[in-house]
Image: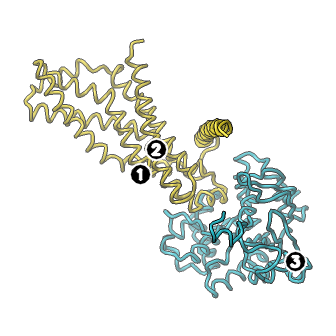
Chain colours: A yellow, B cyan
Amino acid sequence: MRRTSVLERIRLFGRAGIDVLATLGRSVLFLLHSLLGRTATGNGFQLLVKQLYSVGVMSLAIIVVSGIFIGMVLSLQGYSILSQYGSEQAVGQMVALTLLRELGPVVTALLFAGRAGSALTAEIGNMKSTEQLSSLAMIGVDPLKYIVAPRLWAGFISMPLLAAIFSVVGIWGGAMVAIDWLGVYEGSFWANMQSSVSFREDVLNGVIKSVVFAFVVTWIAVFQGYDCEPTSEGISKATTRTVVYASLAVLGLDFILTALMFGDF
Amino acid sequence: MSAENPYAVELKGLSFKRGERDIFKDIDLSIVRGKVTGIMGPSGCGKTTLLRLIAAELKPSRGEVWVNGVNLPSLSRSDLFDMRKQMGVLFQSGALFTDLDVFENVAFPLRVHTQLPEEMIRDIVLMKLQAVGLRGAVELMPDELSGGMKRRVALARAIALDPQILMYDEPFVGQDPIAMGVLVRLIRLLNDALGITSIVVSHDLAETASIADYIYVVGDTQVLGHGTPDELMHSDNPRIRQFMQGTPDGPVPFHFPAANYRDDLLGRR
């Protein structure tokens, strides 16, 4: 009896492993079919612009507001620590480096997963459950090209731009608190920032991070929608999976990328 | 090649499984070009699945699906989408695009597959909507329509490109008597006027029998029988007779397989 149960557990473990690999395989094929080969029937550019609006422009408010507050908090915390060493002039440098290297790309990706990623999953899942995807396929239009590809490209394009906006407004929020409220000398705030931030080391690496996160988060979001069980419970689970998987992937990848970029191996 | 073949659709040795459960086992079915063919059977027997197999939305576990002389499961993804321009499917829910109004839903296939000028698209859309009696609803959004109206708009969209094969998934469900009568006549009229092949999946016996030239009865993973509506009404096969006459007692069980009723109630399971 005991032996059977152990065997059964091994079998279930093996089955779970096969399922994970099968899902990974499906998601890679899904991505290749969506992005490669024949382009969408109809006006692909118009579809892209529509998605750029709903995925990118509609995420602007949450990105801008979060960016300002995070910049302001960084400035407050930085000032209270640095002033103990008499280095409060370096608060601009600290805010800029933290935002450009880490918080800009990472927090934008997390917010994007919660706001646009979950919406993408729910929208595509709902299209699946109401047979709109099947209906498109029966009209002779590939839903991967018509529905999925514009959303993927919109995510890839808009997230790095949102991350850049996040960092810019974050630095502006930080400057507002440090200069106007805490009384840090404006000249040293900006001069320290300018002298310590390197375009290649900091800005470019931040952009690379946000491009990688954009790719992973959007891919997870659209695949979860397309692959979900077409029921209300299935869509709800897929939406949750999008936020959880995307957040974990962003944080895990951030560690790997940071180690590669700044690890001095 | 396809014009010489008297059959628009042929299923050869087709099997389909969902998980471990057999839905179809080695079935053969041929649908004659230019006729209305009904596919009937009890609920849950896989009629809609059969429609999705013919449209190649599902891949069979084994066997061939020939449509207009082409074996669909052997086609590449892009060839399959090209092939589907010859087919139209009316889904049970209508499956209208919720972000487009009625006009744009019907115009959609014309916009993506043709280069027609806007005036011509407008005329075609209005003609198709007139045929289903909904020209007046041209500006409404799908969520402003009833279930039956959605299906009629979906029918207008399905015939927008004048397909060679038109498949209807339970077209009579949820229609009021007037719409039902119009729909029955419309299916027949479209078939005869446009020379298309119609496949009607339904369990509405009277309506399907009144328009179908030929009927297949499916159930229990098999094709139980086929023939003209008259032949089936007078069939010797007790399973077909039971279905056609709608009697609860017979070889086709009404109940889903279950344990003994008494034991179940007494908690002896």
From the viewer's side, name the closer residue of A218 and B185.
A218
> Disc 2 marks which amino acid?
Ala
Q: Position of residue A194 (x, y in %)?
A: 23, 21
Residue behind mark 2: A154
Single out the mark in the foreground, 2 or 3: 3
In the rendered image, the vertical position of residue B53 relative to residue A73, given as above or below: below
Q: With A151 as the anchor, is B196 left or right in this view?
A: right
Asked if the residue under mark 2 is in contact with the one under mark 1, i.e. CB atoms within 8 Å, the reply is yes
Q: Earlier in the sequence, mark 1 or mark 2?
A: 1
Label 3 to label 1: alpha-carbon separation:
58 Å
Residue found at the very far top of the displayed protein: A265
Chain for disc number 2: A
Label 2 to label 3: alpha-carbon separation:
59 Å
Q: Could you tell me which quadrant the N terminus of chain A lies in? A: top right
Label at residue B238 = 3
Residue behind mark 1: A54
